[in-house]
């Protein structure tokens, strides 16, 4: 008997609710925190744009540049504001500048500088993407963030 997507999710939730935290395996913990293996990038699918969530850690920039240079997408979108005025420079500007230093052409980079948290990264970026590419023409975005942050990004 095949389970439809809704029933699969209910079955997974049921299993999670029955798990004993003291006996969880590393694989079970990884699935709970990061999702199923099908949600993880397999390294083969291209996208229309590489969407980089705001953050001060340059690892995100380095990964995005690696994806861009390997031909996974023709554009980069860096997101992130000035953290409610706490920082002199928006995160997106800092990330863009680093990507340019690494050889990415400025015309391949979009930035969104108004957001202050994950939800705003997404909402404010919709306007940037619509103006730059047209939302109706976007089929896949490659998301880049930190491991612990990815569940909030989905």
Image (cartoon, helix red, strand yellow):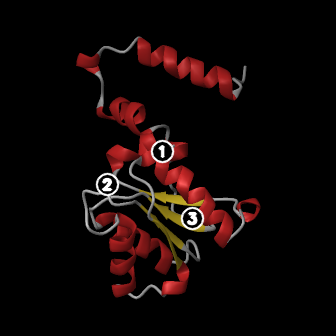
Residue 108 horizontal/vertical position (percent)? 54, 81
Q: Nearer the viewer, residue 142 or 126?
A: 126
Residue 11 horizontal/vertical position (percent)? 56, 18
Residue placed under numbered mark 2 in the picture: 83
Would residue 94 be visible to someone looking at this image? Answer: yes
Quarter location, residue 62? bottom left
Within 10 Å of disc 2 (Cα), the crowding (few <14, some 14-19, many 20+) is: some
Disc 3 on helix, strand or loop? Answer: loop
Disc 2 on helix, strand or loop? Answer: loop
Mark 3 vs mark 1: in front: 1
Mark 1 vs mark 2: in front: 2
Residue furthest to the right: 136
Please tell me which of labels 3 and 1 falls first in the chain. Answer: 3
Residue placed under numbered mark 3 in the picture: 44
* 10, above or below 59, in the image: above
Q: CA distance from mark 3 to mark 1?
A: 28 Å
Quarter location, residue 132? bottom right
Mark linked to residue 94: none
Report whether 56 appears left or right of 127. left
Within 10 Å of disc 1 (Cα), the crowding (few <14, some 14-19, many 20+) is: few
Q: Nearer the viewer, residue 87 or 36?
A: 87
Residue 20 horizontal/vertical position (percent)? 31, 14
Quarter location, residue 125? bottom right
Residue placed under numbered mark 1 in the picture: 119
Q: Quadrant of the N terminus?
A: top right
């Amino acid at each position: 008997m095949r389970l439809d997507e809704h029933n699969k999710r209910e079955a997974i939730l049921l299993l999670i609710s029955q798990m004993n935290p003291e006996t969880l395996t590393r694989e079970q913990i990884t699935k709970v925190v990061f999702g199923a293996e099908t949600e993880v990038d397999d390294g083969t699918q291209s996208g229309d744009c590489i969407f980089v969530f705001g953050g001060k850690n340059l690892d995100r920039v380095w990964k995005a540049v690696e994806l861009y240079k390997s031909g996974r997408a023709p554009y980069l979108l860096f997101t992130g504001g000035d953290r409610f005025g706490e920082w002199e420079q928006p995160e997106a500007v800092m990330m863009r500048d680093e990507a340019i230093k690494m050889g990415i052409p400025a015309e391949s980079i979009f930035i969104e500088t108004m957001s202050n948290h994950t939800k705003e990264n997404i909402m404010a970026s919709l306007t940037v993407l619509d103006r730059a590419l047209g939302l109706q023409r976007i089929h896949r975005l490659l998301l880049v963030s930190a491991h612990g942050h990815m569940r909030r990004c989905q």
